[in-house]
Amino acid sequence: MRSRNVLAVLLCTLPLSAQQGDKKEHGNMDPVVPEKDIPPSPVLSPAEALKSFQIAPGFVIEPVATEPLVDKPVCLDFDSAGRIWVCEMRGYMPDIDGKGESVPQGRISVLEDSDGDGKADKNTIFLDKLMLPRAICVYGDGVLFLDENQMCWQRRDGLKPVGEPVVIDAKFASGGNVEHKPNGLMPNLDNYLYLAKSDKRIRRVGDEWKVEPTAFRGQWGIARDNWGRLYHNNNSAFLFGESLAPNLLQDNPAVKMKYNDSNGLGSNRVWPIRVTPGVNRGYIGKENGYNEQTLDPRTHKLINCTAAAGFAVYRGTNFPKEWYGTAFVTESCVALLKAIKITEKDGKPTGTNPGGEKEFLASTDERFRPVNAYSAPDGSLYVVDMYHGIIQHKTFQTSYLREQHLSRGLDKPALGNGRIYRIRSTSGKLEPKTDIAALQGLDLVKMLMHANAWHRETAQRVLVERKDPATIPFLAKLAANGDAVARVHAIWTLEGMGALKAEHVVAAIKDKDPKLQSSALWASTRLDASELSKLEPVLVSLKPAATEDAPYLARVLGSVGTPKALAALDALLKDEAKAKFIREAAISGLHGHEAEFAKLTGIKDKAFSEWLEQGEKGAAKTPDGPGLKGAELASWTRGKALYGGEAACFACHGPDGGGLPALGPPLAGSEWVTGKPEVMAKILLHGMTGPITVAGETYTPTAEMPALGGNPVFTDEKLADVMTYVRNEWGNKAPAVTPDTVKKQREATKDRAGRPWSAAELK
């Protein structure tokens, strides 16, 4: 699966054809693991599968649901009664060639534990004949879900659908392929749903769905902490964490700022307990003439993750306290669950691997395919196991991996298996079953104080849905007093109900707890202008409780925009000049006040001055359209479709061309893009290996870009179209490229045979 993470420095995906995961330059795909060292991979019963696990001391793993109650599960959500709503991607890779994948046979099912023994004993199929369902969020009156292409809303009465699904956005997940599509729909503290593999966030407003831009995050799986900060990953990097609340720096559409708030957490080293020849680039080794190793030549096990997938930041009550806030990340290719302990200093997260050279959970069963993890209502950790022999999609399947699958019969059975497991501490208690929606008034508000995050977050969701005015006084009281986490929930519940007032955040803004203060400042950005103005006396005299709070205060002062607030902002920027992202936060809040601030500030900083000027001029975005006409405009339009569709360039470079951590450098403002088209054509044709310097900053993608010159689907015209598009998007301005330019470079460099370029060779 290594090919997925780099689809690379300029383009990212190979089109559908037989063994299209093959690289022309990878002529030697001989197995590197002796056949005698590879054990068989039979289908294990759930009881047999339990014997295959090794788990950290003090923990046990046990089934919550197994076949036939569940089939190829990929994700789930809990309703307010704790029932499990699961997406079953039954159509995924029915055979080695993926034949029949286009037949809608996915399901959304509801699993119930009627006798309270911790195991599901009832299955209700809520929706059937879906096309590869991949994300779900359950509301009291319905279900929002994503299938292969669409975002849909299905009303419900209990466990029965009411009417037909309503398509909210028919193209929400279109383009790319099954491994590179939006997923998640995770409710966050700020009452938005966030996704992986997407630059959109979603909020329900009455019967409407509000879709807004946000930062592009991850590949498969998204999680949050108690303060609403987000975590994501990609297949070759276990975990990234953000230090700021989402969208804090994105509220000034007039200014295009470049920043990166993704911090790599922990090591990507893996420690499987079974030999792992069944990974996509398992043949890469020095014995086959390559300069790197996919597998450890001594143990025949994968060295670094290649299929990191869904995960959870554990915030339950069953595990010992030292595990609270630990991320548990699935690795679906080599049958393990990685623990990454998250700590922070001055608001910046870091990660360590507490298991050392031993994983939190690992299996000798090659068919164990953990793809997601969740903090559960009972305080334990749930792990979703797709339990399907083939986990690599046909789009990236290599000839080598095909033989690995067939040799051990991993291509069968096509249907019928799937498991959901519970991991619990042997020393911890499990929470009793609670139906949050059955609570009313003060009893429901008290749930915001619960130690288990699922109870708090579910109570917030129920309160926001109900919007019961009788709960407002209770919420206001909680917002002013008590535990910081509970107070934050109370504030954001009021915001979600449309009832938040300046008076509700004053006490928290003055508090010395930096997390509480920053969240209250964040929430105050949602106040309307009249309410926000009431905070001026508090804000202009406020000193941040910690450096990490400074960007939040800067953001709010900019929005208040009065002379006193702007003067206080200027002083804050000077006093807290070393606070990360503080100037970006100020610009984010100054929308509409840039000219006034420019007149009074004495800050001499080129980038900051340019941002102020850009905002003052109201240059919201690059003007619509590339400024091309006729055939050149047609080429640009085709290139845009390729970028977000068949070529899936966004997978590494982001929809905004800003680049993604560890995957691909930015295309916006890149001299490699706007420079000589012959150089760019060479890169597309033969690939590129890092490091690469773009606009003065050096990037080192985790793998090289695959050559596209040997792929017949990407014709000279298609490559020229993509080049024309990226050379005239996101502020880039460069001449269009003709197919003839690509053709000449293809002929001139044909002897290179797909050997990737280094930056030095192209200078």
Image: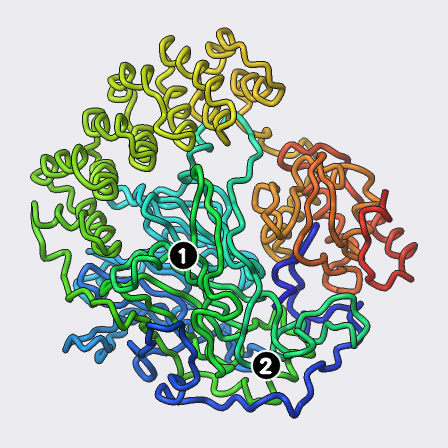
Q: If the image is split into quadrants, where does the C terminus sit?
A: top right
Q: Quadrant of residue 673 in the image?
A: top right
Image mark for residue 184: 1
Depth order, front residue of 382/746:
382
Lateral position of residue 298 relative to residue 103, left or right: right
Q: Could one spot residue 93 in this view of the protein? A: yes
Residue under label 2, please give it. 275
Q: Secondary structure at mark 1?
A: strand
Lateral position of residue 219 relative to residue 299, left or right: left
Q: Position of residue 163 (x, y in %)?
A: 24, 62
Q: Position of residue 312 (x, y in %)?
A: 38, 59
Lateral position of residue 278 relative to residue 187, left or right: right
The three-letter amino acid code for the residue at tag 1 is Gly
Residue at screen point 51% across, 46% down: 216
Q: Which label sits in the foreground, 2 or 1?
A: 2
Image mark for residue 356: none
Of mark 2 and mark 1, the one earlier in the sequence is 1
Q: In the rendered view, would you say 33 is above or below 257? A: below
Q: In the rendered view, would you say 144 is above or below 64? A: above
Residue at screen point 41% across, 40% down: 246
Q: Secondary structure at mark 2?
A: loop
Lateral position of residue 647 relative to residue 473, left or right: right
